[in-house]
Amino acid sequence: MQKVVGRFAPTPSGPLHFGSLIAATASYLNAKSQGGEWRLRIDDIDGPRVAPGACESIVKTLEAYGFEWDGPEVYQSERDAIYQQALDALNESGRLYVCGCSRKQLQKRQPETPWLYDAYCRHDAVKPDVEAMQPEAAWRFQPDGGRLCFDDAVQGPQCLEVAAELGDFVVKRADGVIGYHLACAVDDIEMGMTEVVRGADLLTSSFAQQSIMLALGHEPPHYAHHPLVTNREGIKLSKKSRAPAIRRDEAAETLRAALTFLNHSPPKELNTLIPLWDWAVENWRLLKVKDVVSQKNGLQD
């Protein structure tokens, strides 16, 4: 039987908040309850988005909350060579092309859907050449046509016409930064992920990442996208919505709240981290998360 390997992959644009804790807790428990491994990856590929001290803060907060990951932390910023190998393979198979279109040009060509690339540069079919001068040009990936479907363990069956609904997406930006979907897909392959448990806001991203995995000749992992925590205005908790950082000196209380949100309310007598984690690993059932409706964060009140 294949060993379960899960992961938590935060972007260090700020400290962990309650929504981050939900993702970490759900992914951790789903792996550990099956006797599997849980890896920690810091998605710091986009340097300008990395907040000073955030990587260290994330690690220390997870430690304070009692998370124990298998193996060393993995940092995307140290893996450019691995991503380039994947880009070379995709380029060799004819899946990439150079694109010099700006956002302003896209807005002008299709004002109603500027986020969906219109394949303007695909017709020229210029393959990326790392030795040629191609200034201010991004590399785009061309997905297969047809529907891509998978069974999400929380959200149920999911299907998407990737080429039509996501378009040819960027895998290497014009400034040389590796695209999020490419880095994430390659990391999940290389780290041996068998499952990805994360928030429902990344459900669509799963289709882009699976498209890359399949193009590289790998079967995607299993997916489960849990409901999101929102603030009083119904906005998803995030750094952008100014969600407050979770406190290290309130770890047991906050972990209890996270478990309760995930429809796993611990017994009242469990008030410290070790008993809470022991109980949670023993009683974790992913199917119970399906009954969760996105709700407001009680810690905000």
Image (cartoon, helix red, strand yellow):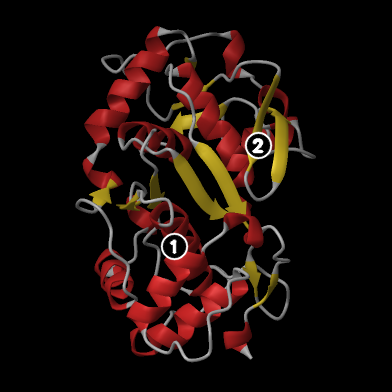
Q: Is residue 282 above or below residue 186?
A: below
User: What residue is shown at x 30% (from left), y 14% (from top)?
Assistant: 132
Residue 137 position within the rendered picture, expressed as x and y whole percent measured from the top left = 44, 27
Q: Is residue 242 left or right of residue 174?
A: right
* Mark 1 vs mark 2: in front: 2
Q: Residue at x 34, y 90 (%)?
A: 249
> On residue 24, which mark appears?
1
For the question of whether residue 15 can be seen, the reply is no
Measured as percent of width and height from the top left, residue 250 is found at: 40, 89
Instruction: State the quadrant of the N terminus.
Output: top left
Query: Which residue is rendered at x = 57% and y = 41% of the image?
Result: 205
Near mark 2 (Cα within 10 A), the count class, few <14, some 14-19 or many ≥20, is few
Position of residue 76 in the picture relative to residue 201 (left or right): left
Task: Determine whether the residue tagged by mark 2 lies in a helix, strand or loop.
Answer: strand
Residue in view at x 29 percent, y 45 percent: 76
Q: Quick check: marks 1 and 2 in contact, CB under 8 Å?
A: no
- Residue toward you, 198 or 37: 37
> What residue sits right under mark 2 in the picture?
151
- The quadrant of the rendering that contains the C terminus is bottom right
x, y (%) of residue 254?
A: 47, 83
Q: Quadrant of residue 138?
A: top left
Three-letter amino acid code at the position of disc 2: Asp
Left or right of 46? Residue 148 is: right
Q: 255 or 42, which is in the foreground?
A: 255
> In what element is the residue under mark 1?
helix
